[in-house]
Every structure is written in C-alpha cells, then in structure tokens.
Amino acid sequence: MNALRTAEVIAVGSELLGWTRLDTNSLFIADQLSRLGIELRAKAVVGDDRGRIQAMFTRALERADLVILTGGLGPTDDDLTREAIAGALGLELEEHEEITERIRRRFERRGAQMPEVNRRQAMVPRGAQWIPNANGSAPGLRLEVDGRLVVLLPGPPRELQPMLLDLCAPGGVIAEGAGAERLHRVSLFTTGLAESQVEALVQPIYSLWRTEEEPIETTILASPGQVELHLTLRGPDEAHARARLARALAALQAALGNAAYSTDGRRLPEVVLASLRARGHTIAAAESCTGGMLLERLTSIPGSSATVIGGVVAYSNDLKVDWLGVATAAIEAHGAVSEVVGAAMAEGIRARTGADVGVAITGIAGPDGGTAAKPVGTVVIAVSIAGQPLMVGTHLFAGDRDMVRVQATQAALNRVRLALQA
Ligand code: ATP
C-alpha cells in the first residue's frame, strides 16, 4: 500500500442533502486523520444514487491515497454504497457467511429472527476485508485498490466512531499507512478580547514560526465571547514537537496576559469550577436575561455539584425583589438593568443561598427593549465574594439575542475567574 498522505471523505445519504440532517461524521474523521498527519483534501455529500456515488468515488480515488465513505451500508434498497463501490471497481459482491452469522446472532440475542434483507449487509466486494461493528449490524469494509486504501463505514456516528478509532489506533490499517509523521496540536483560549485585538497581539509572534524549518501553523477562531488560537506542527518526533509547541504557547501567553485562560483544552466553565474548587468555594447565580444559561454551562461539567449550589432565574422585577431582596426603589430609580440592581442581585443570591460566590446577570438581550441610554446588548454583571469588594460592570455586546446571551454568560464566568485571582 502507498503511504497515506492525502484523503477524501464522501458522506452518502440523501437526508444529508436536506435541511434536517448535517454530515458530522466528516468532522470526526477530519480530526482523526489530522492527528495522523493525513491531509484531508476534499469532502463531499452525495445522495442515495448509485451513479453519482460511483462518479464521486472514482474521482476521489484518482486524487487521494485514502478514500473513506460513510453511510448507505444498511439493508434497504436505498443503501447503495456497497454496490456502487463494487460496480465502480468492477468487483463482484459475494456473501460472507461469517458476517451473515454475526448478524443472525445479533438478532437472536434480541429474541428476533434476522430478516432476509439483512443478508445484503453480508455482501462483500471480492478481495475486500470486513471491519466488525460492535454497535450495529452493518460491518465496515476496506479494500486496497492500486496501492490506495478505500474504507466504507456505517453512517450512525455511534457505530462509525469506535470503528474509525480502531483503524487509526497503533496497529490499525490507517495508522500503519500514515507513516511516522504526526500532526501535533495545542490550543489556547482567550476571552474578553476581540479577534482583531488578539490578532494584533499575537501576529508578530506567530508570523515568525511560519518560516522556520518545521513551521508551526496558527489558526485563529472566534466565537461569541471567545477567541481560540490553534497551533499545529507536523513532525516525526513527539517529544521534540511537544517541547516546541509548549515554548510557542508560553510566548503567546506572555503576549496575551490574563486574557488567556486555558492552554489545555478546558473551556471557561471548567476553568472557573476548578478555580472555585481549589479555594473550597461554592457558587450561586441570579440570572435575568440569560434565563439559566450560566448555571446550565456550569452544571454541564461533571462533578460540579460539589461547587455549584444553584440559583434563580429572576426574570421579573417582582422576583428580583421578593427572592433576591432587591429594593423596589432601586429598580424604579435606576431600572432593572443597572449596576445598582445587578450588585443587589449578586449579594442577594449569595445571602439567600449561603454560597461563597454570588454572580448576577441582568441585561437587554433584544431584539426589543433597548433605549438610547441602554441599547440592546447592554448587560450588567456583578460578582460578590465574601470578604472582597463587590465587582460590577456594564458590557455592551454585539449580535442577536442568542449571541448577547452567550457573551453575557462568558463575561460572567470571566468576571468570576478574575475576581478569584484578586
Ligand atoms: P445502518 O444500516 O446501521 O443505519 P447505514 O450505513 O445505512 O447504517 P445510513 O442509513 O446512511 O447508515 O444512516 C443512518 C443514520 O446515521 C442517519 O439517519 C443519520 O442519523 C446518521 N448519519 C448518516 N450519515 C451521517 C453523517 N455523515 N453524519 C452524521 N450522521 C450521519
């Protein structure tokens, strides 16, 4: 077999061409291949049509060392991948008794008889090897064509993922074909800075890495409330690559200062929870415009119950008053979205729950409700920690309702992070 340097992925399934289903398998595959240093050159989605699958496959095989097809391996008439590939390569399909037996036993374990149509899943193009599927009836298939590798995998992600991981693990046919070079990756996450600000700080540093003998590639990805830097380095020596990437990360961290909050892949909620845990602190939240999103983000982290007490979605003014002890006069004088009210909410939730840290969010997520003085996107965030001065600030976030809400939770988490450092 040729060394596997380039790959193409074809996702088969008419449903993936509609508006209800997205091809996510190719993302998983791209991730695994890139770890092995295999460059994904193209990916495509094609409907359940034999001719079109064949045409796409034939072109991909002319260009890439590895072609992976996903989906269309089921037992029904519209599952055509197996037949299309056999047809394109001029190979006959033969029933493989061992596969039929496995499928039969799979049905029997569930007290059912194997329907005759499932025999289709035991049809293997002559010369192909089959790949066991622990989570479904359709086995995968692999075959070598003029030194190139073709892999067929079932569509459901929970079936495909473990199969692909096996193929990409040491000893697996894709890993063995990939050779010694690997793509080494690290990432650094920042919050509180815009993409252009991050770029201005780090561009003078990473631009030098591009021209080195083993260049480090830097990608900047922005999402609401977060800018990520992803560094990749291709090379055969893991220890050497790791050391270089660690030095590169340190240089970026020095330039970004406190805006850089993670270099180990952990997201902000995880970092904040770890920091709370390290201090033995508990946290509670009072949320208005984010409707519980902050607590949702914190409680989605396993083990958060030791640190997160809970909180309240105080959407109405009445609840802010009754539940959090915010003074009606403060709301009347300053409005529900004001630093006075935000501060009272943070102190109120801390007093009410007995948490060490109280965090509050009150804002105008839009699209309605903005005024000249407080436009849509105005969000007040307050953090109250026992024995520390209260932190309160007003932000103005851009974007639609969802974006404002996400940025508000991100900024609240960041304020807690910074307050814990104080
Ligand atoms: P099975 O017979 O086990 O269902 P299959 O290979 O025939 O396997 P498909 O029928 O093509 O798979 O797809 C089954 C389901 O798997 C789809 O409804 C979809 O939910 C999911 N799926 C298929 N392809 C993809 C893809 N590229 N990305 C994400 N999900 C996918």
Image (cartoon, rainbow, N blue to C red):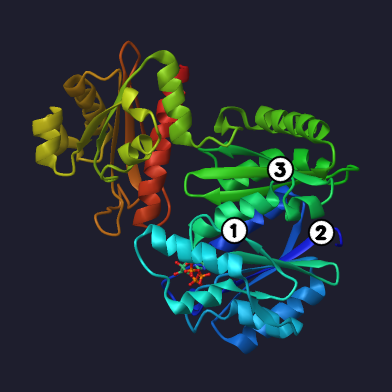
- Whole-percent x, y for residue 190 in the image: 56, 37
Residue most extreme to the right: 213
Labels 2 and 1: the sequence-earlier one: 2
Residue at 72% x, 69% y: name it.
128
Label 3 belongs to which residue?
A: 231
Question: In this image, 150 relative to 73: left or right?
Answer: right
Residue most extreme to the top: 387
- Whole-percent x, y for residue 395 in the image: 39, 40
Residue at disc 1, CB closer than 8 Å to ligand 1: no
Q: Is residue 155 visible?
A: no
Secondary structure type for disc 2: loop
Q: How much space separates mark 2 and mark 1, taking CA atoms?
A: 25 Å
Tag 3: amino acid: Leu
The answer to whether 205 is drawn above or below residue 274 in the figure is: below
Q: Residues within 10 Å of mark 3 (few under 14, many from 20)?
A: many
Front residue of this view, candidates 117 and 250: 117
Front residue of this view, candidates 65 and 304: 65
Q: Residues within 10 Å of mark 1 (few under 14, many from 20)?
A: some
Circle on res. 5: 2
Residue at 75% x, 55% y: name it.
173
The answer to whether 395 is drawn above or below residue 256 in the figure is: below
Q: How much space separates mark 2 and mark 3, taking CA atoms?
A: 20 Å
Q: Quadrant of residue 237?
A: top right
Residue at 76% x, 29% y: name it.
247
The answer to whether 282 is drawn above or below residue 262 in the figure is: above
Secondary structure type for disc 3: strand
Q: Is residue 86 visible?
A: yes
Label 1 belongs to which residue?
A: 132
